[in-house]
Image (tube, rainbow, N blue to C red):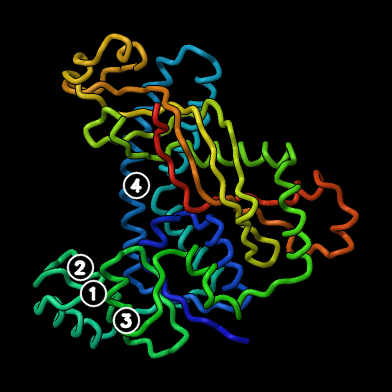
Amino acid sequence: MICMKVILDTTVLHMDPFFKNTEMVKLRNLCSEGKIKLIIPRFVIQEYITQEREKLKSGKEYLATLENRYTKAVYDTEKNMLASIIKNMKKTIAEGDKTIENRIDTFILETKAKIIEPTFEEYKETFGRYFNGDKPFKTIKSREDIPDGIIFSQVKNIKDETVVFISNDKNLRESVARQDITVFSNLSDFITSDNMKNIIEFKEIDNLLLYHLPILMENENLQKIFYNALEEELVFKKITDEKIPDDNYEGTITGVLGIDPIEFTKSEIVKLGDGLFTIPFYCEIDATLEYYLYKADYFCLDEDKMQDIYIDDWNEHYFQAEEEYPLICTGNLGIQFNPHMLNKEFSNINQDKLLQETKISFSELEIVIKDY
């Protein structure tokens, strides 16, 4: 059996910190089956934990914002929603570092990942590059590139033709590629690449499911499952768009008011084996966005625009603002069917029973404000 060695960079973990996106689910399965040997440099783990702790600090600030909104909420539906969110956030924040470390420890244990420590020679090589400004260092003595420099030395020194390096950091990825190592910018490209043709096995049930999936996509219950899962996925996502009157053009989705229409590109369904499929989708969403609006800018808006924005005093210079926006969301829906289902069982099962056993995930989500 072919066993491919895959090395992950921090950017891959950062893009999916809860390890639940569709391609990450597939990677975890392949690791547990022994078809992929996952390798993670120690510095990647440390960077992941540091970045998640920074998010935790931001979460504490946002919790204060939500508690303030709760005290001013009028409708029971809004108060109940906020109460639930506040309760979950308080639990997450209270557990803090323990939750973050448990999350990465569980991922390492589940995937049987090998954690590699830098050697003295690799430190020496890295600082030689640091003082010379050699790649992946962008300039001479660029301190911010030291972690990438150490990761680069470790990856370069793994002598194996099956090694694959995955990183969304263009500079680091291109530096590794110059060492004749296969690289990918994300898990999605890797999982669907030709490299995986000899790794992923397809069973007859996968072909049966693929044949029937376009019909299943019309099932009302599946669309409800999709709707609920997407709504949960979108809340608290940040989006950047010049239409948002925030200094950084940034807003946070605080509520999903409606999702319609939903369109699936059935001609581009991809089977990933073991009952897992991805389907590209497009949908339009009515949502509320929260952002921070400079007070002087607010009073320069026309009257109709001002009436569309709910404001709350944030500090001396800014309002905390909330406003409805039409959004467009695209991405890939992941559908995981029971991988142990037999052909005979599939023939005798009804659609609703089949869908009760499915799991939903998402990947490559992109959200923009619709032109209006």
Compared across the picture, whether 19 is left or right of 325 comes to: right
The percent position of residue 83, horizontal first and vertical second, equals 50, 26
**Residue identifier under label 3:** 154
Work out which residue is located at the far front of the displayed protein and give it. 267
At label 1, which amino acid type do we have?
Gly
Circles 2 and 1, Cβ within 8 Å, touching? The answer is yes
The percent position of residue 311, horizontal first and vertical second, equals 31, 17
**Residue identifier under label 4:** 55
Image depth: mark 1 or mark 4 in front: 1
> Badge 1, how many Cα within 10 Å: few under 14, some, many 20+?
many
What label sits on residue 366 in the rendered view? Answer: none
Dot placed on the residue nearer the N-terminal end, 1 or 4: 4
Badge 4 element:
helix
Q: CA distance from mark 3 to mark 1?
A: 9 Å
Q: Residue at x 38, y 79 (%)?
A: 116
Dot placed on the residue nearer the N-terminal end, 3 or 2: 2
> Badge 3, how many Cα within 10 Å: few under 14, some, many 20+?
many
**Residue identifier under label 1:** 149
Q: CA distance from mark 1 to mark 4?
A: 25 Å
The percent position of residue 356, horizontal first and vertical second, equals 76, 46
At label 4, which amino acid type do we have?
Lys
Q: Residue at x 36, y 74 (%)?
A: 41
